[in-house]
Amino acid sequence: MGVKEPNKRPDDERRGRLRVARRVVVKVGTTTVTGPQGELCKERVEPIVGAIARLMADGRQVVLVSSGAIGLGRNLLGLHHSRLHDMVTKQACAAVGQSLLMEAYKNLFAACGVRVAQVLLTEGDFTNWGRYTNLRRTIERLLRFKVLPIVNENDTVSTRELESVASRTRNAPFSDNDRLAALVMSGLEADALVLLTNVDGLLGRSVSETGGTSSERAWSEVIPLIEEVTGELKNLAAGPSPSGRGGMITKLEAAEIAMNCGGTAVIANGQSPNILDRIFAGDQVGTAFLPTRRIRGKRRWIAYAAEVRGRAVVDEGAQQAITQGKASLLVSGVVRIDGPFSPMDVVSVVDRTGNEFARGIADCASHEAEEGVAKKSPRSAKGRRGATSRVLMRRDNIVLLQES
């Protein structure tokens, strides 16, 4: 369901939504938090701390997702010039650096009269519905106490975020702090997600990339407003930065999650003066992403946080029944089952070409579905399926990933 305000221009909608946003998630990247040697960059961090304190004094609830632990640990251990290819060394740096990061934040926020709490998360805190629900309750209680939750992945025990970009799977609930921030924003049903990085926003294609002339130089400027994340936009995104682990593509993915959860996202330069104050005053800075629809409650978890265990390849009739008829998925509409899954696992639903258009909670195990596919009755002359076909996914447990 769309959530746009039809009588407002996009610029006005952006300004209005950010001015009234009451619950916000702010993510700061490694290049903002740390300097060239991995040391804490107080010149960049202190203004952000002050801005968050002002947002909280204004009655807004704020959650901070912060990178930088590995850089700080690397600096303390004297590994400035070493390439951290070894997973265990990265985890050791994270263990050392996380305490340094929290100590720095504790002191900086204390000077502004703000109390902080450390929230370290692993993938299981998102993929398990019970733990996901408990996480939301805990953070909401902290917000009620007017405490600032500072979130990071627990790199000491979790390796998902530390893996190389090439090794990450599409179905991973999160693999970097950009997506982690988006999932926190989604779980808390926050109004806005701000991703602070070392560039001014999403840039258009440069002259050198297009092979064009100086007359096309405007394409290298920041794109101020985005209402849909398209394949063309994703092609504009660069790979991960040398010191960070995400890059612009993960920020686009995070922004898209925010948009589909009814929130507004902003990618902006964390080094710009008064950047958070300007964003929430409604100034046109960075790249803003307007909400497209609002997936609620457990459906958000199915769409973005849950780990996908397998997939069901369906025929055209089943796809149409799900996307247009709002029907359950019957085994009779399944062409093939890929990968093992159990009842209550989240399973991907794809068409014959492999395009994923939905996800849902399985009503039965994969071997039972496979048996049903093998035994399903042929279509009658009228084109109807057998009346006793088993339900693989019930309608209220299916989420469409694409607008029909």
Image: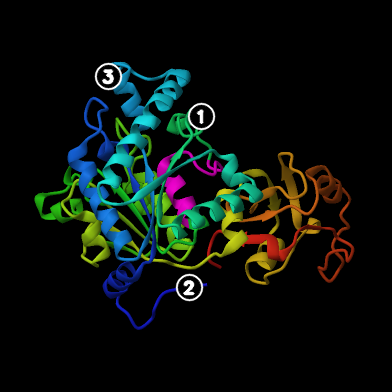
**For residue 148, above or below residue 122:** below
Sequence-first tag of 1 and 2: 2
Magenta residue check for 275: no
Q: Are the two marked residues, 1 and 3, in contact with CB atoms closer than 8 angstroms?
A: no
**For residue 335, above or below residue 5:** above
Residue 286 image point, x, y percent? 24, 56
Q: Secondary structure at mark 1?
A: loop
Amino acid type, label 1: Thr
Q: Residues within 10 Å of mark 3 (few under 14, many from 20)?
A: some
Name the foreground residue: 19 vs 291. Answer: 19
Name the foreground residue: 353 vs 398. Answer: 398
Residue 257 relative to residue 114: left or right: right
Res 80 label: 3
Task: Give the magenta-colored segment's residue range.
Answer: 170-185
Residue occupied by mark 1: 159
Q: Residues within 10 Å of mark 2 (few under 14, many from 20)?
A: few
Residue occupied by mark 2: 2
Compute the Cα span from label 1 to label 3.
21 Å
